């Protein structure tokens, strides 16, 4: 079932600047706020909210936003604000999405939209009831090489997908405190990108079964407390395609995001960690420079996804990555978690729209 089209952007007429607020002024919120403030014509950063008043004020001052608050309700009560970017931690997302939709605001929410299917449904229903745009931050779809790969699949150049793979390796060395990382983050916040991507690269097919293995290979000392930093999943689709997704929290050579679709007519690959197209040839071989941060490697993708969000608001069109897509990716992640617990494959029945 497709989601009803949101009503045209009544909170933000097309002949005026669109005013957006960022809720969550941390690492990715700062990145997105800078894009909104400086890089999308006709769009302005009207407010920054963070439970840390200091963080909100610092980011707002740096980017020239007129309002800095610590209570999201203060943002949602402002009639001039047409849309909200929810960039708080994952477990805060659903409450903020529901409150924003109920206040009539269009919402861009970072992944994961929710960490339970019940909450995913609440978020979807709130946006549908309000007739507001709900877009989820699966930025990889907007990265030029990934978008070109999907276009090749749509043209039939790859034929029917048979084998697929997607990987995420976060830049190392891993220095975070494992105790501060919520359990199952590798599935709910990292591999969820890969699960969404695999679905998107296999258009019209649904994931039906997952089998996953995960371990703490980077920080074995944290294994006993449930911290997992390395994982592989296989996902089987209803058109027969078999996919693998893998993740690591520490790639010493930089941020590494790649995918491949092998089909009946050919193969398409995508993703390249190079930060420039320079190659340095010397006595010891060839050296290339790699991206050390997602916000560098995915810079064009973040701009493209946020531009698409503002265009969906202006046109009154559904978001290019909506709540139902996010629900399917979440259902796959949750099936993987069950699979790690049980050691057996798990049906993704819950993912059905
Ligand atoms: N798409 C991507 O490439 C990408 C990259 C990084 C992070 N993320 C996602 O973005 C989200 C945030 O990650 P991060 O790394 O920026 O986290 P972060 O910890 O750096 O920032 C989160 C900020 O939200 C604030 N906050 C907490 N609860 C809040 C609330 N209820 N209302 C307002 N502010 C609140 C915190 O004070 C903090 O400043 C996560 O869901 C993460 O998975 C996505």
Image (tube, helix red, strand yellow):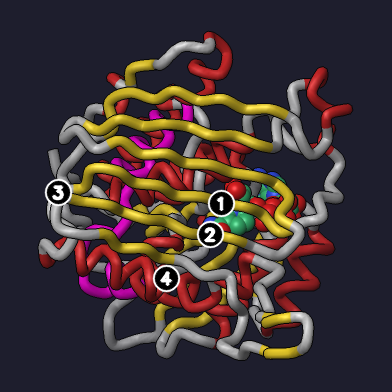
- Which of the image's four quarters has the N terminus? top left
Disc 2 marks which residue? 257
At a point 70% along the width and 37% down the height, the residue shown is: 229
Does label 1 point to a residue whose CB lies under 8 Å from ligand 1?
no
Which is more N-terminal, label 3 or label 4?
4
Instruction: Tell me if I can see residue 348 in this picture.
Output: yes
For label 2, count other residues whose C-alpha is less than 10 Å away and answer few (under 14), some (14-19) or many (20+). Answer: many
In the rendered view, would you say 291 is above or below 49? below
CA gap, disc 3 to disc 1? 24 Å
In the rendered view, would you say 170 is above or below 150? above
Which is more N-terminal, label 2 or label 1?
1
Residue 322 belongs to the span the image colors magenta: yes
- Which of the image's four quarters has the C terminus? top left
Q: Dots 3 and 1: beta carbons under 8 Å?
A: no
The span picked out in magenta is 310-334
CA gap, disc 1 to disc 2? 5 Å
For label 4, count other residues whose C-alpha is less than 10 Å away and answer few (under 14), some (14-19) or many (20+). Answer: many
Disc 3 marks which residue? 160
Q: Nearer the viewer, mark 2 or mark 3?
A: 3
In the rendered view, would you say 201 is above or below 83? above
Q: Main secondary structure of the magenta part?
A: helix
For label 3, count other residues whose C-alpha is less than 10 Å away and answer few (under 14), some (14-19) or many (20+). Answer: some
At a point 78% along the width and 70% down the height, the residue shown is: 57
Q: Dots 4 and 2: beta carbons under 8 Å?
A: yes
Answer left or right for 132 relative to 44: left
In the rendered view, would you say 218 is above or below 282? above
Disc 4 marks which residue? 143
| Rendering coords of residue 154 (x, y %) | 15, 62
CA gap, disc 1 to disc 4? 14 Å
């Amino acid at each position: 079932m497709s989601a009803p089209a949101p009503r045209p952007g009544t909170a933000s007429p097309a002949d005026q600047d669109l005013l957006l607020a960022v809720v969550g002024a941390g690492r990715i919120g700062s990145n997105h706020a800078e894009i909104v403030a400086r890089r999308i014509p006709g769009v302005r950063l009207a407010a920054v909210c963070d439970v840390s008043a200091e963080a909100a004020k610092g980011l707002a001052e740096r980017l020239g936003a007129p309002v800095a608050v610590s209570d999201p309700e203060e943002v949602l009560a402002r009639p001039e604000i047409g849309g909200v970017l929810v960039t708080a931690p994952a477990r805060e997302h659903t409450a903020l999405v529901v409150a924003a939709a109920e206040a009539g605001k269009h919402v861009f929410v970072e992944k994961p939209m929710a960490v339970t299917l019940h909450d995913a449904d609440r978020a979807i229903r709130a946006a549908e009831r309000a007739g507001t745009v709900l877009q989820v931050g699966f930025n990889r779809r907007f990265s030029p090489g990934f978008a070109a790969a999907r276009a090749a699949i749509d043209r039939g150049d790859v034929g029917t997908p048979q084998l697929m793979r997607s990987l995420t390796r976060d830049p190392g060395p891993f220095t975070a405190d494992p105790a501060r990382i919520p359990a199952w983050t590798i599935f709910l916040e990292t591999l969820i990108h890969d699960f969404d991507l695999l679905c998107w690269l296999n258009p019209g097919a649904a994931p039906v079964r997952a089998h996953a293995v995960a371990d703490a290979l980077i920080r074995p000392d944290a294994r006993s407390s449930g911290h997992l930093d390395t994982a592989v999943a296989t996902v089987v689709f209803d058109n027969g395609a078999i996919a693998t997704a893998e993740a690591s929290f520490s790639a010493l050579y930089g941020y590494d995001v790649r995918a491949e679709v092998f089909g009946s007519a050919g193969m398409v690959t995508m993703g390249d960690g190079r930060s420039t197209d320079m190659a340095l040839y010397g006595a010891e071989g060839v050296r290339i420079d790699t991206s050390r941060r997602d916000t560098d490697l995915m810079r064009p993708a973040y701009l493209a996804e946020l531009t698409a969000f503002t265009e969906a608001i202006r046109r009154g069109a559904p978001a290019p990555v909506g709540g139902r897509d996010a629900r399917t990716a979440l259902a796959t992640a949750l099936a993987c978690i069950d699979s790690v617990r049980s050691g057996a494959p798990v049906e993704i029945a819950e993912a059905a729209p």
